[in-house]
Image: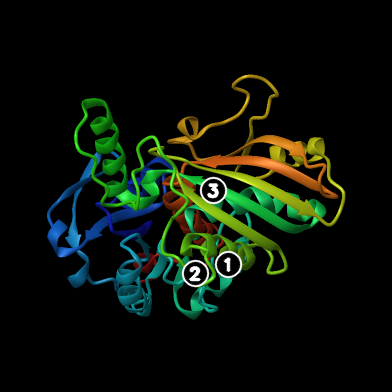
Amino acid sequence: MGFKIAIAGATGNVGREMLNILSERGFPADEVVALASARSQGTEVSFGDKTLKVKNLENYDFSDTDICLMSAGGAVSLKWSPKIGAQGCVVIDNSSAWRYDQDVPLIVPEVNPDAISMFTRRNIIANPNCSTAQLVVALKPLHDFAKIKRVVVATYQSVSGAGKDGMDELFNQTRAVFVADPMESKKFTKRIAFNVIPHIDVFMEDGYTKEEWKVMAETKKILDPKIKLTCTAVRVPVFIGHSEAINIEFENEISADQARDILREAPGCLVIDKHENGGYITPYESAGEDATYISRIREDATVENGLNIWVVSDNLRKGAALNAIQIAELLVNRGLIKAKKQAA
Protein backbone atom coordinates (compact mmCIF):
# COMPACT_ATOMS: atom_id res chain seq x y z
CA MET A 1 0.00 0.00 0.00
CA GLY A 2 1.36 3.42 -0.99
CA PHE A 3 1.71 6.71 0.83
CA LYS A 4 -0.68 9.64 1.16
CA ILE A 5 1.00 12.89 0.12
CA ALA A 6 -0.23 16.46 0.53
CA ILE A 7 1.15 19.44 -1.43
CA ALA A 8 0.64 22.73 0.43
CA GLY A 9 0.88 25.65 -2.00
CA ALA A 10 -0.20 23.46 -4.93
CA THR A 11 -1.28 26.41 -7.12
CA GLY A 12 2.15 28.12 -7.10
CA ASN A 13 5.04 27.59 -9.54
CA VAL A 14 6.88 25.16 -7.26
CA GLY A 15 3.72 23.39 -6.07
CA ARG A 16 2.69 22.62 -9.65
CA GLU A 17 6.24 21.43 -10.39
CA MET A 18 6.06 19.13 -7.35
CA LEU A 19 2.89 17.54 -8.73
CA ASN A 20 4.58 17.06 -12.14
CA ILE A 21 7.68 15.47 -10.64
CA LEU A 22 5.75 13.17 -8.28
CA SER A 23 3.96 11.82 -11.34
CA GLU A 24 7.08 11.67 -13.56
CA ARG A 25 9.13 9.73 -11.01
CA GLY A 26 6.33 7.33 -10.10
CA PHE A 27 6.46 8.13 -6.39
CA PRO A 28 4.68 5.34 -4.42
CA ALA A 29 1.63 7.43 -3.51
CA ASP A 30 -1.88 5.96 -3.34
CA GLU A 31 -3.35 9.41 -2.82
CA VAL A 32 -2.15 12.94 -3.56
CA VAL A 33 -3.99 15.93 -2.08
CA ALA A 34 -3.57 19.50 -3.39
CA LEU A 35 -3.80 22.20 -0.69
CA ALA A 36 -3.70 25.99 -0.78
CA SER A 37 -5.24 29.01 0.94
CA ALA A 38 -9.01 29.55 1.14
CA ARG A 39 -9.00 31.86 -1.90
CA SER A 40 -7.63 29.03 -4.11
CA GLN A 41 -10.08 26.40 -2.81
CA GLY A 42 -11.78 24.61 -5.72
CA THR A 43 -9.07 25.57 -8.24
CA GLU A 44 -8.03 22.63 -10.41
CA VAL A 45 -4.40 21.49 -10.80
CA SER A 46 -2.92 18.68 -12.92
CA PHE A 47 -1.34 15.54 -11.50
CA GLY A 48 -0.26 13.18 -14.26
CA ASP A 49 -3.39 12.40 -16.27
CA LYS A 50 -5.63 13.36 -13.35
CA THR A 51 -7.06 16.68 -12.24
CA LEU A 52 -7.09 17.51 -8.53
CA LYS A 53 -9.42 20.01 -6.85
CA VAL A 54 -7.56 22.19 -4.39
CA LYS A 55 -8.60 21.91 -0.74
CA ASN A 56 -8.22 24.49 2.02
CA LEU A 57 -5.05 24.04 4.09
CA GLU A 58 -6.71 25.75 7.09
CA ASN A 59 -9.19 22.95 7.76
CA TYR A 60 -7.35 19.90 6.38
CA ASP A 61 -6.81 16.96 8.75
CA PHE A 62 -3.24 15.58 8.40
CA SER A 63 -3.74 12.65 10.79
CA ASP A 64 -3.90 10.09 7.93
CA THR A 65 -1.32 11.85 5.70
CA ASP A 66 2.29 10.60 5.57
CA ILE A 67 4.21 13.47 3.94
CA CYS A 68 3.38 17.14 3.38
CA LEU A 69 5.42 18.92 0.72
CA MET A 70 5.19 22.52 1.96
CA SER A 71 5.60 25.25 -0.63
CA ALA A 72 3.32 27.95 0.73
CA GLY A 73 5.88 30.48 2.01
CA GLY A 74 7.74 31.06 5.26
CA ALA A 75 4.94 32.59 7.32
CA VAL A 76 2.54 29.75 6.47
CA SER A 77 5.21 27.17 7.22
CA LEU A 78 6.08 28.70 10.59
CA LYS A 79 2.42 28.52 11.57
CA TRP A 80 1.49 25.14 10.13
CA SER A 81 4.56 22.89 9.94
CA PRO A 82 4.78 22.22 13.71
CA LYS A 83 1.03 21.47 13.81
CA ILE A 84 1.30 19.12 10.84
CA GLY A 85 4.39 17.42 12.29
CA ALA A 86 2.56 16.92 15.60
CA GLN A 87 -0.09 14.90 13.69
CA GLY A 88 2.60 12.42 12.63
CA CYS A 89 2.95 13.78 9.10
CA VAL A 90 6.52 14.58 7.97
CA VAL A 91 6.83 18.11 6.52
CA ILE A 92 9.37 18.76 3.78
CA ASP A 93 9.49 22.54 3.71
CA ASN A 94 10.63 24.61 0.76
CA SER A 95 10.77 27.99 2.55
CA SER A 96 13.60 29.46 4.62
CA ALA A 97 11.54 29.13 7.83
CA TRP A 98 13.31 26.07 9.28
CA ARG A 99 16.66 25.89 7.47
CA TYR A 100 18.70 27.31 10.33
CA ASP A 101 16.96 25.46 13.18
CA GLN A 102 19.41 23.07 14.84
CA ASP A 103 16.67 20.46 15.27
CA VAL A 104 15.71 20.47 11.58
CA PRO A 105 17.90 18.69 9.01
CA LEU A 106 18.71 20.71 5.86
CA ILE A 107 19.04 18.10 3.13
CA VAL A 108 20.37 17.73 -0.40
CA PRO A 109 20.19 13.96 -0.97
CA GLU A 110 23.34 13.78 -3.15
CA VAL A 111 25.32 15.68 -0.50
CA ASN A 112 24.27 14.88 3.10
CA PRO A 113 21.68 12.05 3.06
CA ASP A 114 22.70 10.68 6.47
CA ALA A 115 21.67 13.92 8.21
CA ILE A 116 18.03 13.06 7.44
CA SER A 117 17.81 10.70 10.44
CA MET A 118 17.34 13.64 12.84
CA PHE A 119 13.99 14.59 11.22
CA THR A 120 12.18 12.85 14.09
CA ARG A 121 12.98 15.75 16.46
CA ARG A 122 10.30 17.94 14.86
CA ASN A 123 8.98 15.87 11.94
CA ILE A 124 10.23 18.71 9.70
CA ILE A 125 12.92 18.55 7.00
CA ALA A 126 14.14 21.73 5.28
CA ASN A 127 14.81 22.15 1.56
CA PRO A 128 17.69 24.58 0.86
CA ASN A 129 17.64 27.80 -1.11
CA CYS A 130 17.54 27.13 -4.86
CA SER A 131 21.02 28.64 -5.35
CA THR A 132 22.48 26.59 -2.50
CA ALA A 133 21.15 23.27 -3.80
CA GLN A 134 22.98 23.36 -7.12
CA LEU A 135 26.08 24.88 -5.50
CA VAL A 136 26.58 22.09 -2.95
CA VAL A 137 25.81 19.32 -5.49
CA ALA A 138 28.80 20.61 -7.50
CA LEU A 139 31.06 21.33 -4.51
CA LYS A 140 30.59 18.09 -2.52
CA PRO A 141 32.58 15.68 -4.74
CA LEU A 142 35.39 18.23 -5.13
CA HIS A 143 35.44 18.85 -1.35
CA ASP A 144 35.70 15.10 -0.73
CA PHE A 145 38.73 14.90 -3.04
CA ALA A 146 40.77 18.03 -2.23
CA LYS A 147 39.08 19.79 0.76
CA ILE A 148 37.67 23.24 -0.01
CA LYS A 149 39.05 26.21 1.94
CA ARG A 150 37.24 29.14 0.32
CA VAL A 151 34.51 29.77 -2.24
CA VAL A 152 33.60 32.99 -4.07
CA VAL A 153 30.28 32.68 -5.90
CA ALA A 154 28.28 35.09 -8.05
CA THR A 155 24.76 33.91 -8.83
CA TYR A 156 22.76 34.81 -11.95
CA GLN A 157 19.22 34.02 -10.80
CA SER A 158 16.15 33.75 -13.02
CA VAL A 159 12.93 35.64 -12.33
CA SER A 160 11.01 32.42 -11.56
CA GLY A 161 12.85 32.48 -8.23
CA ALA A 162 10.55 35.38 -7.39
CA GLY A 163 7.43 33.40 -8.34
CA LYS A 164 4.80 33.93 -11.01
CA ASP A 165 4.75 37.69 -10.36
CA GLY A 166 8.46 37.88 -11.23
CA MET A 167 7.94 36.00 -14.48
CA ASP A 168 4.97 38.20 -15.39
CA GLU A 169 6.99 41.35 -14.72
CA LEU A 170 9.80 40.27 -17.05
CA PHE A 171 7.29 39.37 -19.77
CA ASN A 172 5.32 42.61 -19.44
CA GLN A 173 8.40 44.82 -19.29
CA THR A 174 9.98 43.10 -22.31
CA ARG A 175 6.80 43.64 -24.30
CA ALA A 176 6.65 47.27 -23.12
CA VAL A 177 10.14 47.89 -24.52
CA PHE A 178 9.05 46.82 -28.01
CA VAL A 179 5.69 48.60 -28.11
CA ALA A 180 6.90 51.71 -26.20
CA ASP A 181 4.44 51.20 -23.34
CA PRO A 182 5.10 52.69 -19.87
CA MET A 183 7.48 50.56 -17.78
CA GLU A 184 6.22 49.32 -14.39
CA SER A 185 8.42 47.75 -11.68
CA LYS A 186 6.38 46.15 -8.89
CA LYS A 187 8.12 42.90 -8.00
CA PHE A 188 11.70 44.03 -8.54
CA THR A 189 13.46 47.16 -7.24
CA LYS A 190 14.56 48.19 -10.74
CA ARG A 191 13.60 47.33 -14.28
CA ILE A 192 14.45 43.67 -15.02
CA ALA A 193 13.92 43.61 -18.81
CA PHE A 194 17.31 43.88 -20.59
CA ASN A 195 18.95 44.58 -17.24
CA VAL A 196 20.56 42.84 -14.25
CA ILE A 197 19.85 43.70 -10.60
CA PRO A 198 22.51 43.01 -7.91
CA HIS A 199 19.87 42.74 -5.20
CA ILE A 200 17.80 39.71 -4.12
CA ASP A 201 15.84 39.76 -0.83
CA VAL A 202 16.36 42.42 1.86
CA PHE A 203 19.60 44.19 2.78
CA MET A 204 21.29 43.27 6.05
CA GLU A 205 23.42 45.45 8.33
CA ASP A 206 26.73 44.25 6.86
CA GLY A 207 25.69 45.19 3.30
CA TYR A 208 24.98 41.64 2.16
CA THR A 209 21.45 40.70 1.15
CA LYS A 210 19.45 37.97 2.87
CA GLU A 211 19.75 35.81 -0.27
CA GLU A 212 23.54 36.02 -0.11
CA TRP A 213 23.49 35.22 3.60
CA LYS A 214 21.28 32.17 2.95
CA VAL A 215 23.75 30.73 0.45
CA MET A 216 26.64 31.25 2.87
CA ALA A 217 24.88 29.88 5.97
CA GLU A 218 23.25 26.91 4.23
CA THR A 219 26.43 25.77 2.47
CA LYS A 220 28.19 25.64 5.81
CA LYS A 221 25.34 23.68 7.43
CA ILE A 222 25.01 21.17 4.58
CA LEU A 223 28.63 20.74 3.52
CA ASP A 224 31.19 21.93 6.09
CA PRO A 225 31.10 24.77 8.64
CA LYS A 226 34.84 25.40 8.10
CA ILE A 227 34.44 26.48 4.46
CA LYS A 228 34.83 30.24 3.96
CA LEU A 229 32.28 31.48 1.46
CA THR A 230 31.28 34.86 0.04
CA CYS A 231 28.42 35.48 -2.37
CA THR A 232 26.96 38.14 -4.67
CA ALA A 233 23.38 37.34 -5.76
CA VAL A 234 22.14 38.91 -8.99
CA ARG A 235 18.71 38.77 -10.67
CA VAL A 236 18.89 38.38 -14.46
CA PRO A 237 16.24 38.58 -17.22
CA VAL A 238 15.92 34.80 -17.64
CA PHE A 239 12.62 32.99 -17.01
CA ILE A 240 13.90 29.64 -15.64
CA GLY A 241 17.34 28.42 -14.58
CA HIS A 242 19.88 29.79 -12.11
CA SER A 243 23.55 30.10 -13.08
CA GLU A 244 26.60 30.47 -10.84
CA ALA A 245 30.18 31.50 -11.49
CA ILE A 246 32.16 29.76 -8.74
CA ASN A 247 35.80 30.27 -7.75
CA ILE A 248 37.11 27.59 -5.39
CA GLU A 249 40.34 27.43 -3.38
CA PHE A 250 41.38 23.99 -2.08
CA GLU A 251 43.73 22.80 0.64
CA ASN A 252 45.11 20.04 -1.59
CA GLU A 253 46.15 19.87 -5.20
CA ILE A 254 43.48 19.32 -7.86
CA SER A 255 43.71 19.84 -11.61
CA ALA A 256 40.94 20.83 -14.01
CA ASP A 257 41.14 17.37 -15.61
CA GLN A 258 40.78 15.67 -12.23
CA ALA A 259 37.81 17.90 -11.36
CA ARG A 260 36.17 17.08 -14.69
CA ASP A 261 36.56 13.32 -14.10
CA ILE A 262 35.28 13.57 -10.50
CA LEU A 263 32.23 15.61 -11.49
CA ARG A 264 31.39 13.28 -14.38
CA GLU A 265 31.02 10.45 -11.85
CA ALA A 266 29.24 12.50 -9.15
CA PRO A 267 25.53 11.97 -8.42
CA GLY A 268 23.26 14.67 -9.84
CA CYS A 269 26.04 16.27 -11.91
CA LEU A 270 26.30 16.45 -15.69
CA VAL A 271 29.50 17.87 -17.18
CA ILE A 272 29.24 19.70 -20.53
CA ASP A 273 32.65 21.27 -20.98
CA LYS A 274 34.14 21.58 -24.45
CA HIS A 275 36.51 24.42 -25.30
CA GLU A 276 34.52 25.49 -28.35
CA ASN A 277 31.56 27.64 -29.35
CA GLY A 278 28.48 26.33 -27.54
CA GLY A 279 30.46 23.72 -25.60
CA TYR A 280 28.87 24.76 -22.30
CA ILE A 281 25.43 24.93 -20.71
CA THR A 282 23.15 27.95 -20.38
CA PRO A 283 19.98 28.29 -18.29
CA TYR A 284 17.81 27.99 -21.40
CA GLU A 285 18.97 24.38 -21.92
CA SER A 286 18.63 23.49 -18.24
CA ALA A 287 14.91 24.34 -18.03
CA GLY A 288 12.84 21.22 -17.45
CA GLU A 289 15.91 19.09 -16.66
CA ASP A 290 16.88 17.43 -13.37
CA ALA A 291 20.68 17.65 -13.54
CA THR A 292 23.07 20.17 -12.09
CA TYR A 293 25.14 21.09 -15.16
CA ILE A 294 28.81 22.02 -14.89
CA SER A 295 30.88 23.78 -17.56
CA ARG A 296 33.94 26.05 -17.96
CA ILE A 297 36.09 23.97 -15.56
CA ARG A 298 39.52 25.59 -15.47
CA GLU A 299 42.43 26.24 -13.14
CA ASP A 300 42.85 29.58 -11.38
CA ALA A 301 46.55 30.44 -11.50
CA THR A 302 46.17 33.40 -9.11
CA VAL A 303 45.87 31.14 -6.04
CA GLU A 304 47.40 27.83 -5.01
CA ASN A 305 45.02 24.94 -5.80
CA GLY A 306 42.31 27.09 -7.39
CA LEU A 307 39.52 26.25 -9.83
CA ASN A 308 36.76 28.13 -11.63
CA ILE A 309 33.52 26.39 -12.62
CA TRP A 310 30.18 27.43 -14.15
CA VAL A 311 27.10 25.72 -12.68
CA VAL A 312 23.54 25.86 -14.07
CA SER A 313 20.32 24.20 -12.92
CA ASP A 314 16.54 24.53 -13.24
CA ASN A 315 15.71 26.39 -10.02
CA LEU A 316 12.10 25.16 -9.96
CA ARG A 317 13.26 21.54 -10.14
CA LYS A 318 16.60 20.77 -8.42
CA GLY A 319 16.42 24.13 -6.67
CA ALA A 320 13.03 23.34 -5.15
CA ALA A 321 10.49 20.70 -6.24
CA LEU A 322 12.81 17.89 -7.34
CA ASN A 323 15.00 18.17 -4.23
CA ALA A 324 11.91 17.99 -1.99
CA ILE A 325 10.70 14.83 -3.74
CA GLN A 326 14.18 13.29 -3.59
CA ILE A 327 14.03 13.89 0.19
CA ALA A 328 10.66 12.10 0.31
CA GLU A 329 12.16 9.23 -1.69
CA LEU A 330 15.06 9.07 0.76
CA LEU A 331 12.61 8.73 3.68
CA VAL A 332 10.82 5.89 1.90
CA ASN A 333 13.88 4.08 0.52
CA ARG A 334 15.65 4.07 3.89
CA GLY A 335 12.52 2.80 5.61
CA LEU A 336 12.40 5.86 7.88
CA ILE A 337 8.63 6.17 7.49
CA LYS A 338 5.83 3.68 6.95
CA ALA A 339 2.51 4.44 5.26
CA LYS A 340 -0.10 5.11 7.98
CA LYS A 341 -2.75 3.06 6.17
CA GLN A 342 -0.36 0.14 6.03
CA ALA A 343 0.59 0.52 9.68
CA ALA A 344 -3.11 0.59 10.63
**Foreground pick, 303 / 42:** 303
User: Residue 305: image x %, image y %?
Assistant: 83, 49
162 left or right of 290 in image: left
- Distance from Cα at disc 3 to Cα at disc 1: 15 Å
**Residue kind at label 1, given as amino acid type:** Ala
Task: Kindly report which numbered mark, 3 or 1, lies closer to the viewer in this rendering.
Answer: 3
**Foreground pick, 251 / 69:** 251
**Residue kind at label 2, given as amino acid type:** Arg
Q: Between disc 3 and disc 1, whose residue precedes?
A: 3
Q: Look at the picture and state if 53 lies above or below 256.
A: below
Task: Kindly report which numbered mark, 3 or 2, lies closer to the viewer in this rendering.
Answer: 3
By what rule are the colours in the image chosen?
rainbow
Q: Which mark is residue 217?
A: 1
**Foreground pick, 14 / 1:** 14
**Residue kind at label 3, given as amino acid type:** Thr
- Distance from Cα at disc 1 to Cα at disc 2: 9 Å
Q: Return the residue at label 2.
A: 99
Asked whether disc 1 touches disc 2, contact meaning CB atoms under 8 Å apart, the reply is yes
| Residue shown at the point (61%, 68%) measured from the top left | 221
| Residue shown at the point (53%, 60%) measured from the top left | 212
What is the crowding at mark 1: few (fewer than 14 residues within 10 Å), some, or many (at least 20)? Answer: some
Asked whether disc 3 touches disc 1, contact meaning CB atoms under 8 Å apart, the reply is no
Q: Return the residue at label 3.
A: 155
Q: Which image quadrant: the C terminus?
A: bottom left
